[in-house]
Structure formats: C-alpha cells, structure tokens
Amino acid sequence: MLNNKFIKIFTITVLLSIMSVFVMGCGGGQTIDQKGDAQAIDKWVLATNHEFSVRPDGYPELKKVYDFKFDDVQVMDLGVTYGALQNDKVPVALGFATDGRIAAFGLVNLKDDKSFFPVYNPAPVIRQEVLESHPELKEILAPISKKLDTATMTDLNKQVDVDDKKPEAVAREWLLKEGLIEEKNPPADKGTIRVGSKEFTEQLLLGAITIKVLENEGFKVEDHTGLNGSLVVRTALEENEIDLYWEYTGTAWLTYMGNEEAITDPEECYQKVKQADAKKGLVWLDYAPFDNTYTLMMRKTDAEAYNIETLSDLAEVIKANK
C-alpha cells in the first residue's frame, strides 16, 4: 500500500494540474501557443526543494560549476516539481533521474556533462551472517540487479506513479516477463528473510521485487517495506531488525558515512561503500546500472526549441538572456 507521504504528493500534483487549466504562465516561466509549441522564455526559473536550494553541494555549488544563475528559484516539495514544469509554471525543475513522470509528462533530463551530481546506484545490502547462512542469495538477486537499467526502472516507476498500479502487481508482472519467477511459489522451507525498504515508489518496487523472488525460491519473507526514512531503514539493518534492503551508493557514502565530497564514478563509489560497510558486517551485493541521482528537467518542446541537451547548454542560454 502506498504511504501517506506519496498520497499527499500525488494529490498536490493532481490539484496543481487542475489549477493550471485556469491559470497559465504563473511564476514567470513562458507562454505556450495554442498548438502547445514552445515560445520565448522571458524568465528562467528553477523549481526545487528547500534542501537542494541551500545545501553546499546543491544549487549554490551547481551555480559555480556551470557558471550561471537562474533569475529566480521557487522552493516546493520535490514531488510537485514535475507538475509545475509540465503545467508551464517554471521552465526548469529538479527531479530524480528515474522518475516515471518524466517521460509521461513530456519532460526530458538534461545531461550532467560536468559530472556534478553524485552517483546513486542501488544494490541489495545484506547482513553478513544472513548471507553466510544462505550464500545462494547472492546468485538469486544478481539477475535482478543486472536487468534494472534506467529505461526499465523508469518504466516500472511510471506504472505506479502515473498508471496507478500497485507496486506488488508491477513487480510480479515484470518478474514473470523476465522469467525470474514462476506462476506458483514452492513451499517456504528455506528459512525466513526479513526484507525492508524506504517509503517512496522506487524503493517499494525494489522491496516487492525482492520479496517475490525470495518467495519463489522457497523462503518465507517478512515484509518490512515502506519504512519512513533512510536512517530508519539503515538503523533497522544495523540493529538486526531486518536482513536486507536496497540502498543507494551515494546515500551511503554521503549520509551514513559522513563524507563531504561526492563521488561521480559508479564503480568507485560502490567499492568504497562496500569496503566501509564490510567492517560493520554488512555486505553489498551487485549494484544495478541505473542511477537515481538528481536531475534538472525541461519540457521536451522547450529543450528542443532552445537546442538544450546538457546543463552546459542551459547555462549558456541563461547567460545569453541576461
């Protein structure tokens, strides 16, 4: 079941969409002609959340790396930025790279050509004693990591966030299509595994996928998905309240391990968090190729009209507009 936070975000997004029917161009973004084609953007505004707008490795540093500055920054819940961009409230917005609403809303990610954003590749993290008791878990979960590329994860997220399907149903359908599970589960005689996850859509999907694969392999699974907050899930793993969950390399490196300098190379970040957590009895299994990092988004029509594909392109257009 989707958590209250997601329901609130989704509700606000829907309300924002309805309001846009009556009020267009609010916030100094741009105007759109009757055919929906892009026209001149008179004010470059960024929609972002409060954290990214003030954190040292967020917008303040982004301005320095790309040598540009937006005319205005509008702070809102990160879940609302997609609707604000879709409905012409702002010309640029912050989001997450694998969010299913990007393609569904006619948006595009701008390429981070200077590798500013840290990497956030997910991997199953499991307590060492559990893996020693069930070494087959590494081989069971490896095919999942391998198949979860950006296009796949974005589509799975879209099915939940846009098509309003349940994470459990989406997970089962995908696993069956990929041949990773069978229609019926065998008897649960291999022991109990406690699976956790954070509370947002992508994590609920990763948790549901893991649960269904383990059940298909004959494990009894305790469902602890949807825990509220990264630190809550991490603490649950460290204190033996859950056995495994999917974590992002960048989150572990910056948040749990307290490093200030971000890593932008996926393999480097993975190896460093893997080595650090090994000392705590936590094992990082194979990481997925998709990277759920921050992204700056534009409407596809605007990006094409201004020939913007990268953040450097965006910076040059904004500076030329001064």
Image: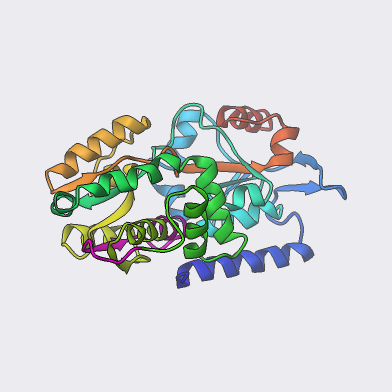
* Nearer the observer, 157 or 199: 157
Residue 226 falls inside the magenta stretch: no
* Nearer the observer, 17 or 207: 207
In percent of width and height, residue 89 lies at 68, 54
In percent of width and height, residue 164 lies at 59, 65
Please tell me which residue is depicted at 43% across the width and 42% down the height of the picture: 58
Q: Does 60 appear above or below 243?
A: above
State the scheme by which the image is colored: rainbow
Q: Is residue 272 visible?
A: yes
Please tell me which residue is depicted at 41% across the width and 56% down the height of the picture: 209
* Nearer the observer, 240 or 31: 240
Q: Is residue 10 left or right of residue 43?
A: left
Q: Quadrant of the C terminus?
A: top right
Q: Does 167 appear above or below 271?
A: below
Please tell me which residue is depicted at 51% across the width and 64% down the height of the picture: 169
Q: Is residue 96 visible?
A: no
In percent of width and height, residue 123 lies at 33, 45
Q: How many numbered badges does the structure rendering display?
A: 0
Give the image quarter of residue 205.
Answer: bottom left
Which stretch appears magenta? 186-206
In percent of width and height, residue 81 lies at 58, 54
Q: Does 70 appear above or below 186?
A: above
Q: Is residue 119 left or right of residue 130?
A: right
